[in-house]
Image (tube, rainbow, N blue to C red):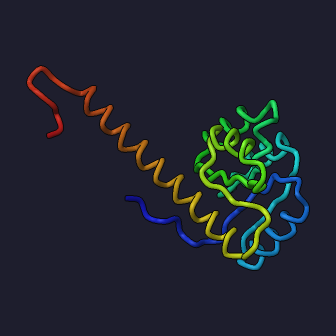
Amino acid sequence: MSEMPDKRMLKILICDPDRKFVQTARRILGSEGHTVVVEANLCEAARLALKNIPDVVVLPSEFANDPNADLIIEIIHHMTPRPAVLLTIQMARFDIARKAWLKGADGTLFKPILQDQELKAAIDWARGQVAERLESESQLDDETTKASLRTDGGELFQ
């Protein structure tokens, strides 16, 4: 099992047009010493992320309806180190949230934020999911490599 991500100061990119959410998130994350960049335009947010890779990208579930959503998620998932993707979800819009989740989120956060700890816990959870996925992929790559190195007398690694 992988360890939880460290508690260092994070770079967080918020790409959510909900001003009230952004204000609340900035206050909560800023008070923890994290760097918060806000860009409501999805394509511009991806450009910013490529220039300075964030630890976490916060996207609204409505992003799934954007024609560039698949490309944006593909870009995020291939960044090194890979940022966690946290989806914000309006409680009444599970249909959109599910569509967005299937595109490749690592965690979710229901809006409105009722307690500061909700945002912090959602970020920690999403980062933990990325760490576990990367560890699983690494183990799978190791197994694939070992399988490809078989000789007619058995495995090289036993």
Task: Residue at 24% x, 27% y: name it.
Answer: 149
Task: Examine the rendered structure and indicate whether residue 102 appears above or below residue 152.
Answer: below
- In the rendering, at what x and y percent does residue 78 appear? 60, 39
Q: Residue furthest right?
A: 19
Q: Quadrant of residue 76?
A: top right
Quarter of the rendering occupied by the N terminus = bottom left
On the rendered structure, is 120 left or right of 5?
Answer: right
Residue at 63% x, 39% y: name it: 102
Q: Nearer the viewer, residue 14 or 81?
A: 14
Name the spot of residue 122 as percent of width and height, x first: 63, 64
Front position in the image: 90 or 132: 90
Question: In the image, 70: left or right of 82?
Answer: right
* Residue located farthest toward the left when viewing the structure as drawn: 153
Residue 67 appears left or right of 145? right
In the current view of this chain or complex, which residue is farthest to the front? Answer: 92
Q: How many numbered marks, from 0 up?
A: 0
In the picture shown, does residue 135 fall above or below 122? above
Residue that appears at 63% across and 47% down = 105
Viewer-proximal residue among 123 and 146: 123
Q: Quadrant for residue 34, please give it.
A: bottom right
Residue 107, given in percent of the width and then of the height, sits at 62, 54
Q: Quadrant for the C terminus, please.
A: top left
For this rendering, which residue is in front, 88 or 40? Answer: 88
Q: Residue furthest bottom?
A: 31
- Residue lying at 43% horizontally and 42% vertically, measured from the top left: 137
Position above or below: 115 against 36: below
Which quadrant of the structure image shows residue 112?
bottom right
